[in-house]
Image (tube, rainbow, N blue to C red):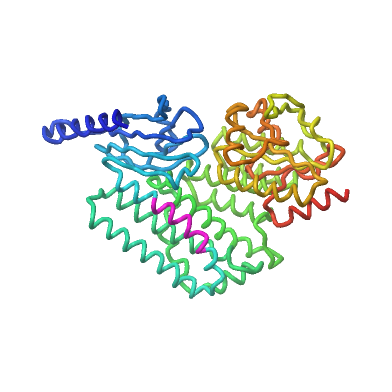
């Protein structure tokens, strides 16, 4: 680490000289770090949707990078399939250290500009824990619920005030930190009708006290400053889901509600189109809700209707092609069809055609080393299912392009065996043909190699019911 500390020291000396001379305005910063158990040899630094650079790790999995012509604000650094935000301002010289096995939890910043970023990562981790707690609180009556989340907001506000009293912070930090608190609070308000028990969501909406959503009148649906900020998007997703719920009940014939109702999802896409004019924000929201609907649907006709609505509203040509291809791939995987011909490789480096390894009722699931929690949870779940349903073959396929040895190492490091484990010979094409999204996707195949369900999920409440049906076919 001495080399990196020396580089940062040099940077700080340069900043100091500039400040003393008052001749040059500093418009750059340094960011560097060390990544333990790297998933690739690169770190990507982005500002918004623009990639600033792809930075190669050295032989000790470290890097240092000078951000020239700095546009101060939130940046994203990506490694493998994971990412996190970092606030970079002029004269910052930020180092971080993380372990990919516990990406967010292990992340620690040092150097000039570290305190504000450690504040943000701690807030991020607290918000993750808080999410589960808030969902439990949603079973309270509205007045009691509001009292609890008001208390959470007040605690966060006092914590921020204490931080600002203790450290010198910029106006930019204050603005982002306040937005973080506000939009977390607003999100808690928006989720209440969905998380509260009962299928009659219309009745829940009517039970809310007057003023429960008063903050909505001040929401900017086209906030260019926050457009790259995750908490803002999380709020918008919940807000549009809630607003669409109100619209839905204006014309719904039934009081019962479920999130994948076609008319409700069409209402939501229409509402986004009518309220959002910022193309970046609109396209992200439209993409999110469209792909989510399709990934949970086994109805090709409904998928086509949603797709057509999406195509009319989005301006993102790349996403149009991606989602259109996704819908077409799902059509090819309909019930009673056969899997496309794909090559997989086992951990002895033997190559097979995918259909050739199916000789009994089979469940195919997928994993990636970049989604570590899912990797562990799914393998523990599979172990349980294999013991309960010995009549079924459980095949697991890694979707990464890392080679046999590195993928095998991931399995062995967690003490998972390699039986019925494979990886794709051509991951990119295989993921497209099998429409692998989200990662929880599971494909159920009968003894005749015919698809029973190409869009299942081993964590769903009715999954074992589907397995019993497979056995009894």
Image location (x, y in percent) of residue 409: 58, 33
Q: Nearer the viewer, residue 455 or 352?
A: 352
Q: Is residue 153 above or below residue 4?
A: below
Left or right: residue 379 versus residue 51 is: right
Left or right: residue 90 versus residue 56 is: left
Q: Main secondary structure of the magenta part?
A: helix
Image location (x, y in percent) of residue 131: 50, 59
Q: In this view, does 348 lie above or below 274?
A: above
Image location (x, y in percent) of residue 170: 25, 48
Counting the numbered discs, the total is 0
The image quadrant of residue 332 is top right
Left or right: residue 38 versus residue 27 is: right
Q: In this view, does 332 lie above or below 57?
A: below
* Residue at x 51% of width, y 45% of height: 282
The image quadrant of residue 356 is top right
* Residue at x 38% of width, y 39% of height: 97
Image location (x, y in percent) of residue 35: 43, 35
The residue stretch that appears in magenta: 122-134
Q: Is 449 included in the stretch rendered in magenta?
A: no
């Amino acid at each position: 680490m001495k080399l990196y500390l020396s580089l940062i020291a040099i940077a700080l000396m340069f900043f100091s000289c500039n400040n003393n001379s008052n001749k040059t305005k500093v418009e750059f910063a340094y960011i560097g770090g060390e990544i333990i158990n790297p998933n690739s040899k690169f770190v990507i630094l982005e500002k918004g949707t623009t990639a600033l650079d792809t930075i190669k790790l050295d032989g000790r999995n470290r890097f240092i990078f000078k951000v020239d012509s700095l546009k101060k604000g939130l940046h994203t650094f990506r490694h493998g399939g994971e990412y996190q935000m970092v606030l970079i301002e002029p004269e910052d010289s930020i180092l971080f250290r993380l372990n990919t096995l516990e990406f967010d939890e292990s992340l620690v910043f040092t150097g000039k500009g570290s305190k504000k970023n450690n504040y943000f990562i701690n807030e991020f981790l607290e918000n993750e824990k808080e999410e589960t707690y808030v969902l439990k609180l949603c079973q309270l009556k509205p007045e009691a619920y509001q009292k609890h989340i008001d208390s959470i907001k007040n605690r966060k506000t006092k914590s921020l005030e204490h931080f600002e009293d203790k450290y010198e912070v910029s106006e930019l930090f204050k603005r982002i930190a306040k937005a973080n608190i506000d939009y977390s609070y607003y999100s808690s308000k928006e989720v209440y009708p969905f998380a509260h028990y009962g299928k009659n969501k219309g009745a829940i909406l009517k039970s809310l006290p007057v003023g429960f959503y008063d903050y909505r009148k001040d929401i900017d649906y086209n906030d260019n400053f926050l457009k790259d900020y995750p908490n803002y998007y999380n709020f918008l997703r919940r807000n549009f889901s809630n607003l669409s719920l109100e619209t839905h009940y204006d014309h719904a014939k039934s009081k019962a509600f479920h999130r994948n109702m076609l008319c409700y999802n069409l209402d939501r896409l229409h509402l986004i189109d009518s309220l959002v004019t910022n193309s970046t924000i609109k396209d992200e929201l439209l993409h999110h809700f469209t792909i989510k609907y399709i990934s949970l649907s086994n109805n090709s006709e409904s998928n086509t209707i949603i797709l057509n609505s999406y195509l009319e509203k989005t301006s993102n040509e790349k996403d149009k092609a991606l989602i259109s291809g996704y819908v077409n791939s799902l059509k090819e995987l309909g019930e009673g069809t056969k899997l496309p011909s794909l090559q997989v490789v086992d951990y002895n480096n033997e190559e097979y055609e995918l259909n050739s390894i199916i000789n009994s009722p089979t469940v195919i699931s997928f994993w990636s080393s970049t989604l570590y929690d899912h990797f562990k949870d799914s393998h523990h779940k599979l172990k349980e299912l294999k013991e309960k349903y010995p009549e079924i073959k459980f095949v697991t396929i890694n979707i990464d392009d890392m080679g046999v040895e590195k993928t095998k190492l991931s399995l062995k490091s967690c003490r998972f065996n390699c039986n019925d484990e494979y990886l794709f010979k051509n991951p990119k094409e295989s993921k497209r043909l099998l429409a692998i999204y989200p990662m929880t996707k599971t494909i159920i195949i009968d003894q005749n190699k015919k698809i029973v369900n190409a869009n299942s999920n081993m964590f769903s409440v009715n999954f074992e019911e589907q397995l019993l049906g497979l056995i009894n076919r």
